[in-house]
Amino acid sequence: LRLLYECNPMAYIMEQAGGLATTGTMPVLDVVPEAIHQRVPIFMGSREDVEEVIDFFKKYESS
């Protein structure tokens, strides 16, 4: 999805509601845009579910 138009607004709402939004490697709201139509992967949901996704990425990142 596009970072500025889709991911950031949804990530902001998700985090205000108590959930998390990540690219798998970093929080979506911490991504510095390099282009106006930049696309990024996004995983959003409850804090527990997204932390599970982050743990999965960390586990297989070093492989």
Image: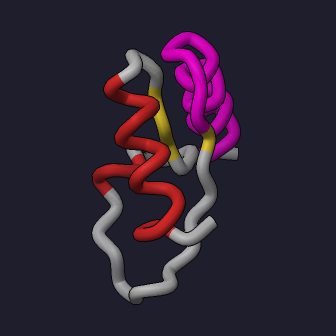
Q: Is residue 22 left or right of residue 35?
A: right
The C terminus, quarter of image: top right
Q: Where is residue 55 in the image (x, y as percent from the top left)?
A: 58, 25
Q: Residue most toward the top?
A: 48
Residue 57, quarter of picture = top right
Q: Give the range drawn in magenta.
A: 44-62
Residue 27, quarter of picture = top left
Above-or-below relation of 18 to 27 = above
Residue lying at 48% horizontally and 45% vertically, measured from the top left: 10
Above-or-below relation of 1 to 60 = below
Count of numbered circles in the view: 0
Residue 61 sits inside the magenta stretch: yes
Above-or-below relation of 10 to 16 = below
Residue placed most toward the observer, 59 or 34: 34
Q: Where is residue 37 in the image (x, y as percent from the top left)?
A: 50, 85
The N terminus, quarter of image: bottom right
Residue lying at 41% horizontally and 52% vertically, measured from the top left: 9
Above-or-below relation of 62 to 7 = above
Residue placed most toward the observer, 13 or 57: 13
Q: In this view, does 37 lie to the left or right of 63?
A: left
Residue placed most toward the observer, 49 or 5: 5
Secondary structure mostly taken by the magenta-highlighted segment of the chain: helix
Residue lying at 58% horizontally and 35% vertically, measured from the top left: 44
Residue lying at 41% horizontally and 55% vertically, measured from the top left: 8
